[in-house]
Image (cartoon, grey):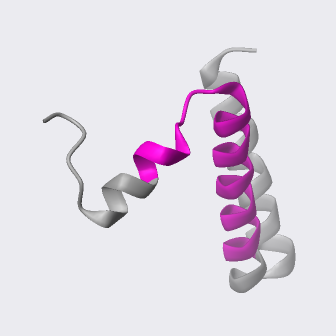
Amino acid sequence: MTHTVTGILVGAVLALTWVTLGFWPFVFVAVAMAVGAIVARVIDGKIDLRNVADAFRGKRSSS
């Protein structure tokens, strides 16, 4: 599946959620999708949680 098709499907899910359930359920679904994407990237090893924690603590990773 290409990124374009994935984007279209995500947009369709969010649009249908907004139309059928309203604004706040739309926000909840969008946040849940974002959290799911982040968890998937952590599992795949594309995001290192130690680097993220260091960034929140103000530590520089480039030095």
The chief SS type of the magenta part is helix
**On the image, which quarter does residue 10 sit in?**
top right
Front-lying residue, 5 or 40: 40
The x and y percentages for residue 23 are: 69, 82
Query: Which residue appears farthest toward the left when viewing the image?
Result: 63
Front-lying residue, 32 or 61: 61
Q: Give the residue drawn at x 73%, y 74%.
A: 28
Q: Give the residue drawn at x 61%, y 22%.
A: 3
The x and y percentages for residue 60 are: 20, 47
Q: Quadrant of the N terminus?
A: top right
Query: Which residue appears farthest toward the top when viewing the image?
Result: 1
Query: Which residue appears farthest toward the right when viewing the image?
Result: 20
Left or right of 8: which side holds 47? left
Q: Give the residue drawn at x 36%, y 54%.
A: 54
**On the image, which quarter does residue 56 sit in?**
bottom left
Does residue 39 show up magenta in the picture? yes
Question: Which contiguous range is marked in magenta?
Answer: 26-52
Front-lying residue, 45 or 23: 45
23 shown above or below 16: below
The x and y percentages for residue 2 are: 67, 15
**On the image, which quarter does residue 30 sit in?**
bottom right
For the image, the number of numbered tags is 0
42 shown above or below 22: above
Q: Quadrant of the C terminus?
A: top left
Q: Give the residue drawn at x 24%, y 62%.
A: 58
Left or right of 50: which side holds 14? right
Does residue 35 show up magenta in the picture? yes
Left or right of 9: which side holds 62? left
Front-lying residue, 46 or 57: 57
